Image (tube, rainbow, N blue to C red):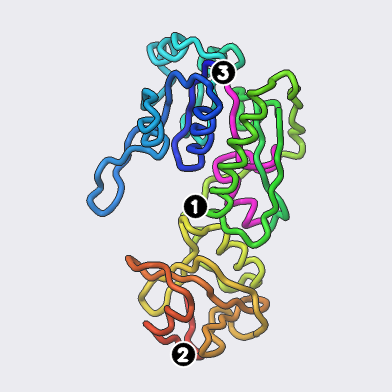
């Protein structure tokens, strides 16, 4: 098929590579413009742009697709379908209608649950037993279009980062199945009454509230890892907590209960497994404590 690919983060790269391996003609890649990154704030191309250039596919990075010139340029490519994966721009109706088979999106949830910007984070933080990907026909509403294919994945104790990588690969494979035989995947209308919205993660959510039950804190830690990263204050230092386990214990919420860094929560306790001090590498609890002892009785905020 003659395909336009639209995506930006690493999540989308497996789908782009799968299209290439399957022999589809990827005529153009659309991705977000380069953004400042790192300490030097140098402009860095998106992972999708880097992958596309490695495959020899031309790239466009429009700031918007709302103007007539950009829409005409898109339509002139004469695509059979546009494959979209975490692109990051709203697609106007003129763009949705331009390819023969419209625009097909790889969405990282089992729709209609978790429509919106942060479906993986929200699934982990909510304690969902499973998540997955949905291949959907895009329409003007936010992730409201008809569903063509779903693939479920167990959450277990995975972090958002681990699921991000896993679902990128699962989504790529699911999209290849759909493109191989579109007629075999009739559209299914979503049940709007069952829809749940997955809002973008607010930075304020990342600060650990020790009054919450240990199970909730542990889920939030996994759901926010590796980005933006749940954090607490140890004295005047901010420390990211990237993985923890629920353990027995009770005390004032935020109190360190022993020299093994067991921390009391509103109900129960947690013990850190992976931590990161500002500007430092990720450490195990044992490595962290060798560099900075946290004695019993310390109160975290």
Specify whether 252 is left or right of 71. right
Q: Mark 3 highlights which residue?
A: 81
Q: CA distance from mark 2 to mark 3?
A: 60 Å
**Does 105 lie within the magenta span?**
yes
Quarter of the figure with residue 18: top right
**Pointer 3 or 1: first along the chain:** 3
Residue at 37% across, 33% down: 54
Give how far across and how far down residue 225 sits, in percent: 51, 59
**Which quadrant is the N terminus positioned in?**
top right
**Pointer 2 or 3: first along the chain:** 3
**Pointer 2 or 1: first along the chain:** 1
Residue at 38% across, 70% down: 277
Give how far across and how far down residue 117 sits, in percent: 55, 41
Whether label 3 touches label 1, CB < 8 Å = no
Give how far across and how far down residue 4 sits, in percent: 49, 21
Q: Residue furthest left?
A: 40
Q: Helix, strand, or loop for circle 3?
A: strand
Image disc number at residue 295: 2
* Residue 196 seen: no
Residue at 55% across, 64% down: 221
Tag 1: Cα neighbours inside 10 Å, few (<14), some, or many (≥20)?
A: few
Q: Mark 1 highlights which residue?
A: 202
Task: Please identify, in this view, whether the residue under mark 3 or under mark 1 is nearer the observer.
Answer: 3
Whether label 2 touches label 3, CB < 8 Å = no
Tag 2: Cα neighbours inside 10 Å, few (<14), some, or many (≥20)?
A: some
Q: Helix, strand, or loop for circle 2?
A: loop
Q: Which contiguous range is marked in magenta? A: 103-126
| Nearer the observer, 226 or 301 | 226
| Nearer the observer, 112 or 87 | 87
Q: Is residue 213 above or below residue 289?
A: above
**Does 74 lie within the magenta span?**
no
């Amino acid at each position: 098929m003659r395909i336009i690919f639209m995506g930006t983060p690493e999540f989308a790269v497996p789908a782009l590579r799968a299209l290439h391996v399957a022999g589809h003609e990827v005529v153009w890649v659309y991705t977000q413009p380069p953004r400042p990154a790192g300490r030097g704030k140098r402009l860095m191309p998106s992972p999708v742009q880097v992958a596309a250039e490695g495959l020899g596919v031309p790239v466009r990075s429009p700031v918007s697709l709302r103007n007539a010139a950009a829409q005409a340029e898109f339509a002139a490519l004469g695509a059979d379908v546009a494959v979209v994966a975490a692109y990051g721009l709203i697609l106007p109706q003129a763009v949705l209608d331009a390819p023969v088979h419209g625009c097909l999106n790889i969405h990282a949830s089992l729709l209609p649950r978790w429509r919106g910007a942060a479906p993986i984070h929200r699934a982990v933080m909510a304690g969902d037993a499973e998540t997955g990907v949905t291949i959907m026909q895009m329409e003007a509403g936010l992730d409201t279009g008809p569903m063509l294919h779903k693939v479920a994945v167990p959450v277990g104790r995975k972090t958002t980062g681990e699921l991000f990588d896993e679902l990128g690969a699962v989504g790529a494979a699911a999209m290849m199945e759909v493109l191989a035989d579109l007629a075999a995947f009739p559209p299914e209308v979503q049940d709007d009454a069952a829809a749940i919205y997955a809002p973008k993660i607010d930075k304020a959510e990342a600060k650990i509230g020790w009054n919450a039950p240990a199970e909730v804190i542990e889920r939030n830690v996994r759901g926010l890892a590796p980005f933006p990263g749940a954090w607490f204050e140890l004295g005047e230092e901010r420390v990211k907590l990237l993985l923890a386990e629920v353990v027995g214990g009770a005390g004032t919420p935020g109190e360190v209960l022993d020299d093994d860094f067991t921390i009391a929560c509103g109900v129960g306790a947690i013990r850190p497994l992976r931590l990161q001090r500002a500007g430092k590498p990720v450490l195990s609890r044992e490595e962290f404590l060798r560099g900075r002892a946290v004695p019993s009785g310390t109160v975290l905020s």
